[in-house]
Each structure stands twice: as structure tokens, then as C-alpha cells.
Amino acid sequence: MAMPTYAMSCFKLPVKLCKDIHAIMARFWWREENGKRKVHWCSWKKMAKGKHSGGLGFKDLQGFNKALLGKQIWRLLTCPNLLMSKVMKAKYYPHGSPLSCEVKGNSSWIWKSMMGAREEARRGARKKIEAGQILKIPISLTGRPDCYFWSHSENGQYTVKSAYETITREKKLLELNGKVKGETSWEGRSGKVWKQLWKMKIKHKQKLLVWKILHQALPCREAHHKRTGKCDIICKICGKNSETVEHIFFHCKQAQMIWRMAPLQWDGLKEHTADFRRWWTMLMEVQTQKEGREHINLTVDILWQIWKARNAAEFDGKDTHPMEVIRKAIKDWEKYHQSQQIQHQLSISETETVQDEEERMGENDYLLNMSVEVGQHVEGQNMGIGVATQNNWNQKCETWILNERSTGSAVQDNLLAIKLALYKLKEKGWQHIKIRTPCIQVLNIIRYQAFSNLKLATHLEDIKDLCSMFRKCSFDRLPGDKDRLGAKLSRLAILLL
Ligand SMILES: [Zn+2]
């Protein structure tokens, strides 16, 4: 059946007309008998579903219409030099973008039709954002025109098919949730957002902060006012605007200075700062880019520090310099980033979603080799303990040095050192470890539980208990080459006091 494709790509069909066409098509399909309608055995919605999802592949005309109109908008965005784009720009958005300009009541039908599909186009259009541009050059100065890609197709090109599929999918989601368009529509689509959030490698308290913001549950003045009718809604820091979440994190004078000083810039996200949820959703898109995750993590550290600084000002009257906020965020990020690189394993207590990585890596990849060495006694008083860790690809991980009172016995000192190292690893959340010691006597005592006195027995008992707290824990002999990091560290440790 031929559909009025050409007309639809220029004009938004009135809803009523779409319904009529639906009816005609449905009737055609089920045939009318003697002018009487036969029972329509299944609903239009079912028929309109794609063939692969049990429907008949009839197109949902309104959706199809929008997808076609979206293509026109797309053309305006990506081909600004076409005559039609120039005409439209001059007429309707001389200084703006077709995605955000105001639509006046007296605009032409064509324009209003196109603008009727704008929301869908806007949701799928992405400006190319370099993940965390370090250079603070505004994009307009680099001479590059804004570059758009379509997020619903693989090659980034707008296709009516991909737009149509997205529109019908979103519609379905809305119906499933039984919710109307508007604020709640975000919740209908937000499953992915939560999944991503809990998976992120950031601190738990930071996840909760983002979670609260997204749920509009963060206590800001405006929200408080809405709920209680009390409290002054004007931001205490700038004294200018009402304090919303967006104000705190983006628009307040303080926040703006902080972002300007940040080592990463999200120029492409600026237009979304009026709505934190939207901003966040867009931010998550760079996850897949090179270093995208690290940039997102730093961004969360900045959000966290902005929030902390705001609270310090609100409750303690303490001003934090924007540079200090950034310095703290970077420090947090570096610390956490390092520990994450080393620890391919997350501490299970913090989040339950390490599966992805576990699936990718074999169990042995998680193995942490730890060599524990004890340095020379200094007159039998102190010992230096050097602990060096290495993952299974022989990459050096963390090292620790410790200065401890010596027991006076080399074997006991080594056992004590192993005990302390086990504590440390447990605290760090490792689960699969191998401890290596250069001392064959110690190794035998542990392996064969061959102790000769009560003191040793006590140490052994502790070690056994500690070992049982790991998923896997084994012991091995450290080869006796001279260049051992642990030995060097233990000598260094002696110098500590
Ligand atoms: Zn403010």
C-alpha cells in the first residue's frame, strides 16, 4: 500500500488524519463485508509492531511522520549550506539552532510541522564531544562547524528507519509504564541510567549523591521550600537566584568558576545544564570513548566537591576557593583512579556489579602476587618490612613499607610480616592472592603447620584465620635473585622511624 510519503516528509499530518489512515489500512487488511465491519482480530497497535516483534510491520503513521520530519531537521543541522537550510535559518532561527529556537505562533505550517518532530530529533542528535577537552578553547574559535551525529544508527547518519524504530520503542516504553509525556517520561527511559550508575567505579557515597540528584531528592533550598513552604529559596552563595540542583552544580557563580578551572571541559553539554537528568544522560554517552570513564569519574569528583563546598558554606559559613575545590577533586580522582588500576577487583561491599569484568577475565587474572620481606635487624630492635605486589601479568602494583618492633627471631618476624601484609590486602579488598616469602623455613612452617613453639603457633593460627578470609590464598617461595623489590623496600623501611 502506497503511503503518502512525500507529503509526510514536509508536513506534520494532523493526528485525526493519521487515525483515519490507520482505520483505512486496518479495514483494507481485514476486508469489509457488505459495508459492515468485520471484527478486527487484533488491535492496530499489534499490527503496527515490526514483523520481528510479532506484528505485521504496518507503520505507525504518526511515528513514521515524525521520523520523516526529523530528517528535514537533520538536514538543517548537518547541511547548513543548502538553500533550504539558509532560507529556514534566516526566517526562523537566525541566531540559534533548529533544535532550540523558539517556535512562534505565526510560523508556517511547514515549519510548525517540522518543529513538531523536534523533540525526537533533539533526543537522538549528539554534538561530537571530545571526551574532556583539555584545551579550553571555545569550539566556535577553532573554526570547526558544530558536528552532529545521530545516536540511533551505527554510522551516525540519520535514517528514517532508525528514527522510526526509536520513536516506536519510546512510545512503547511510555505505554508500558502507563505514564504520560513530560517529567515522568524520563523515568520510563531511565533503566539504563541506573544500571550505568551502579556499575560506575566511583565511591559509593558519590553514587548516592548522583542518585539523589536524579531522583530530585537532594536537599536544596527550592526543593525544601516546595515541600515545607518554609525556607528562603535564594542561593546563599551568590544571593541571586533560587537554589535548584542545577543552580548549585552549574549556574551559581561559584560553580561556574569551578568548572572554568577544571582540567576538563564539557562544552558540548553546556546546553543541557538546565536539566541535570538530561545533562547526566548525555554525559554518560562518552563512556564508550577513549578515557571516557576516567573523565566521567573526575566529573563526579568535581560534583562531589561542589556539593561539599556548598554545604560548608551553608552550614559552617566556610568559603572554599574554587581552585581548592578542583584541587581536592583531582586529588580524590588520582587516588581512586590509581587504586582502581591496581585493583581490577572492586570491593564487593561497595557494589555488586563486577560481573562484567569477571566475565572478561579469567580467574587467574585476578591473582595478586605479594612478596613479603623482612629487612635486617638493627641491633635486634626494629625490623623493616617491605611488601611488593604484582598482578598476574607481572605488572607492579602497590608497595608498602613498614617499620615494626622485631621479635628477635627471623622466623617470627617473617610470620608477623606476613600477617600484617595479609591484613593490608584484606583491607584493600583482594580475594585471590599468593604470598611469596624468601624464607624457606617460614614457608615450611606455614605449609606443613610445623611449629616448634607456642609463639609460632599463635602466629600460625592468626595467619590461618586471615587466609580463610580470602577466596583463594596460597604460599610460594620467592626466588633468591638479588634484585628483589621487597628486599629493597624492607631495607628502606628500616630507615623509617
Ligand atoms: Zn548561587
Image: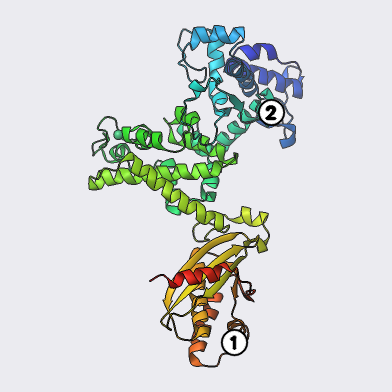
Percent x, y of residue 185 = 50, 34
Q: Quadrant of the C terminus?
A: bottom left
Percent x, y of residue 85 = 58, 11
| Left or right for 181, reference 361 | left
Element on which disc 1 rests: loop
First of labels 1, 2 by sequence position: 2
- The figure's colour scheme reads rainbow
Q: Tell me where residue 82 sits by quadrant.
A: top right
Whether the residue carrying mark 1 lies under 8 Å from ligand 1 is answered with no
Calculate the distance from the C-alpha at mark 1 to the C-alpha at mark 2: 73 Å
Q: Are marks 1 and 2 in contact (CB under 8 Å)?
A: no
The residue pinned by badge 2 equals 48
Ligand 1 appears in which quadrant? top left
Q: Mark number for residue 386?
A: none
The residue pinned by badge 1 equals 449
* Vertical relation: 353 (above or below) 46: below
Q: Tell me where residue 18 sits by quadrant.
A: top right
Residue type at mark 1: give it.
Gln
Nearer the observer, 218 or 413: 413
Residue type at mark 2: give it.
Ala
Q: Quadrant of the N terminus?
A: top right
Residue pictured at 71% horizontal, 23% vertical: 26
